[in-house]
Image (spheres, rainbow, N blue to C red):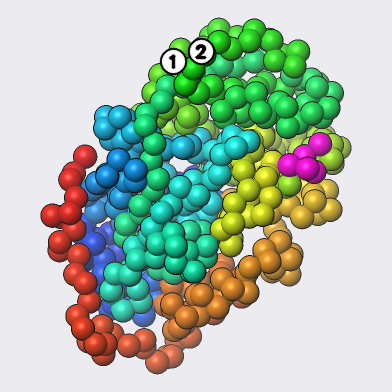
Amino acid sequence: MPEQNWAGTHTFRATAIHNPTSIAEAQAIVAAADRVRPLGTRHSFNDIADGVELLSLVDVPPAMITDGRTVTVTGGVKYGVVASWLEQQGLALHNMGSLPHISIAGATSTGTHGSGITLGNLSTAIRALEFITPNGELETISHDDPDFGGAAVALGALGPIALVTLAVEPSYQVRQDTFRGLTWDALLADPDAVFASGYSVSVFTDWASEQSDVWVKTRLDGSTAVPDELFGAQRETGQRNVLDGVDNMTVQGGVPGPWSERLPHFRVDATPSNGDEIQTEYLVAMTDAAAALRAVRELAASIAPALLMSELRTVAADDLWLSTATGRDSLCIHFTWANLPEAVNAVILHIEAALAPFAARPHWGKVHALDAATVESLYPRLPEFRALVARRDPAGKFGNRHLSTLLGIASRRPGAPRPPTSGDRKGSPRESEDLRERFVAP
Ligand SMILES: Cc1cc2nc3c(=O)[nH]c(=O)nc-3n(C[C@H](O)[C@H](O)[C@H](O)COP(=O)(O)OP(=O)(O)OC[C@H]3O[C@@H](n4cnc5c(N)ncnc54)[C@H](O)[C@@H]3O)c2cc1C
């Protein structure tokens, strides 16, 4: 059976997919490989994770350790596993994506985000990363390292991340409420106010309808009160699904619960979203939010035939070089499409043209049609990222077609000289055998 991504929309071209069960085994595979790409839980919709050979860390038994301020976990662990373990320790992450099924390293490598006007994307929680280098050694890049801004959203270009250290905080409770009937006039009059009405706010729209739904996740640090009306939209008491007929959501209706079971939209024990789908998403500056939404809304009739649902969220600005929110507080304009590639490929060209005046940045893990010149114009620090990759992976072992075509990152040419092995270097590589002693299994 050909190997595919989670949605079945991309068939991997790789000739081998390695699934080591220890970091030490992964190090040996990387050292021996000519070209190898890290692979996570395969939830990206394009070929960003593809390559000549792939290496996934999801079969490495999950391990985690915390000092109360940070948690360090193996890169292939899923967010849901880490979140429920942290909750048991009385700790929490600042935010989560819509689904808990994605790997920590894979999600942060593409700048995966939740929502929240003051909340950075998931990569902004990273405090240190331990990479497997091209010759199979382990090398840490910490928050205070000059390379950190490039390493935190590295798209797999710096090699497999064996360990991720994330900031944690004391556990907190969250309630989720859904509001029905937000008019476009109310949203466009003051998008900042709508998205500031909770800790994490999403607006669900099909663009054509006059009214949208608002989902508000309220952090219960003090008052637990939530209004019955939000900019004219009315609070509901029952459970709502993103897609009609698909019962897979975390508990709503204002019922308080731990952050780990309220911040993701989708329950860990259910299939997230629809499954048979394509996703695209573009991030624009919050200051352009109303104008960008108006521009997309003009396309409502062209969008409708392939659309399952759109979700609007926000992310706070950060300074990570390839983060889709680098340098600007952002509105995320997301589309979940039916699995109709031709129709989707046609309509996203119109959406990208409409959003071009706003320098819209596409989600790295979703389908888009922007070219290299446009991507270059969106990321002022892309030249620095290229230099970082050239320095840390000089032979292009971790490159692939996606990175070379879209970002101009050189891949290893067949027959090119092999990089030096660990035996060529002074000192012995740090072995990962001691990891088992450093960590506790969840
Ligand atoms: C149903 C669904 C819902 C989604 N919801 C959201 C959402 O709420 N917010 C959002 O922003 N995105 C969302 N996404 C997109 C998703 O979060 C990203 O595509 C994410 O990168 C997927 O993580 P993954 O572990 O599957 O990585 P993969 O798709 O397997 O890989 C993604 C990238 O990470 C690299 N990578 C993977 N593992 C490692 C590693 N160990 N070390 C170094 N690099 C690695 C790969 O080389 C590749 O470049 C959603 C996707 C789906 C299918």
Q: Earlier in the sequence, mark 2 or mark 1?
A: 2
Q: What mark, if any, has residue 399 been given in the picture?
A: none
Q: Residues within 10 Å of mark 1 (few under 14, many from 20)?
A: some
Residue that appears at 28% across and 74% down = 137
> In this orientation, which residue lies closer to the viewer: 111 or 296?
111
Q: What mark, if any, has residue 256 been given in the picture?
A: 1
Q: Secondary structure at mark 2?
A: loop
**Res. 292 visible in picture:** yes
Q: Quadrant of the C terminus?
A: top left
Residue that appears at 19% across and 69% down = 431
Determine which quarter of the picture holds residue 87.
top left
> In this orientation, which residue lies closer to the viewer: 276 or 96?
96
Q: What mark, if any, has residue 224 been given in the picture?
A: 2
Q: Position of residue 120 (x, y in %)?
A: 56, 44
Which stretch appears magenta? 286-290
Asked if marks 2 and 1 touch (Cβ < 8 Å), the reply is yes
Q: Position of residue 3 (x, y in %)?
A: 40, 56
Residue that appears at 19% across and 50% down = 439
- Given the image, on which type of amino acid does mark 2 rest? Thr
